[in-house]
Image: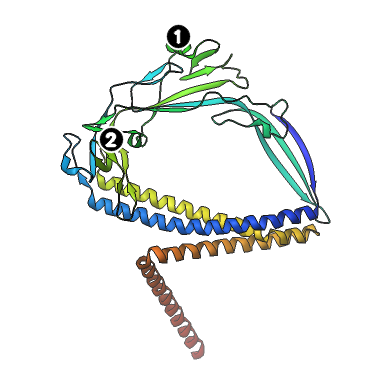
Amino acid sequence: MPDQITRTTTTSWFSRIGSALAGVLVGLVLILGCVAGLAWNEGNAVKIARGLTEGAGTVIEAEVAPILPANDQKLVHVTGVVGVTEPLSDPEFGITATGVKLARTVEMYQWQEESKSETRTKLGGGEETITTYTYSKVWSSDAIDSSNFQTVAGHENPQMTIEPREVYAQDATLGDFRLDDTVLSQMGGAQALPLPPAMLPEVEAAAGQGRTLSLGQNRIYLGENPAAPAIGDTRIAYDLTPAAETSVVARQNGDGFMPWRARNGAEVLLVEDGNVPAADMFQSAQDANTVLAWIIRVGGVILLMVGFGLILAPFGVLADVLPLAGTIVRMGTGLIGFVLGLLVGTVTIALAWLAFRPVTTVIILLVGGGIAFAVYRLGLGRAKRAAAAGAST
């Protein structure tokens, strides 16, 4: 059963007003940052889209062998099977495997704190908050700092001494081309590396004395008993990205690849698994650019709503002298914050579109205006016919 500790805190009305006023400054900074971020996002999305469009019209097909000097510094599309000769290794635990990337993941058994709060506004504007802190043991790939726990005693986490690691092949080739980490890091198809129990002697020899370890479920376990883990126990697993057929769109630079730069400064270096045509690779990149732009738009608008909510928060706190009045005011300020955030976000995006996509924006406005005018005329005509029918009766 997880440990639970409850704490009750009381905040006066004047302290809440001070915190709310400080939140106004945070809200202003957040709004300004979101407006700037949304405007930058539109410009960046256009920049990348135009760079990809230019690249799609510039790219040339090339063979992986032999390398043609005439293509040097040009944007090329090549496909072939990646080759490696030297195995990858993690000498700390004696692990070796042949592929283009060996990734070590590390998890430590640690205490984790979770909190749940219930706040009640009292007559006079003060607040009483009851917070329940729950402590449980979890496997985590991130070090959890127990010094910030509400109750540290009995929930101390040791330092995480083993870190994750990535090793890339230094001799990877694509035909006659050499591949560096820039390309290899974008290759997919990673699979869990088998760690059979028969490897235990090699792992123990590499790990050195003083470490109690075992192998199971494709993991190295550092601890006394995998079936009953203790705080500080660590488990390690590996993923291996195999050498496989790969497609690359990049600038040919001697016998290697570098990002190609469009006229507007956008850089292009695309890597996909398998034999993928250049047109499909550019389309995938355009789709990813669109999705990312929409994620930032939605996130920016939500943060704008939060910012306006912080600015309007003092009104709710002031009204909390009577708890019911405070609840009603917060409902109103919440709605206002939602509307303002949506309005400012939409206007910012629209103005950015007008700045970076003037032709597209004008076309959209004309089409939208035409549809609105047609709907208006249709509704007006129906109203006139209804009025005429009513007069005749």
Label 2 crowd bin: few (<14), some (14–19), many (20+), radius 10 Å = many
Above or below, 344 against 388 in this view is: above
In the picture, measured across the screen, residue 144 lies left or right of residue 7, that is left
Residue 130 appearing in the image? yes
Q: Earlier in the sequence, mark 1 or mark 2?
A: 1
Q: Nearer the viewer, residue 153 or 181?
A: 181
Which mark, residue 201?
1
x, y (%) of residue 213?
53, 14
Taking the spot 20% from the left edge, 42% from the top edge, the residue there is: 72
Classify residue 23 by image quadrant: bottom right
Q: Residue at x 46, y 18 (%)?
A: 92
- Left or right for 9, reference 389: right
Residue 246 image label: 2
* Amino acid bearing label 1: Pro
Q: Is residue 46 above or below residue 233?
A: below
Residue drawn at the location 42% of the way across and 77% of the way down: 373
Q: Relative to 236, does residue 375 appear above or below in the rendering?
A: below
**Viewer-nearest residue: 368 or 186:** 186
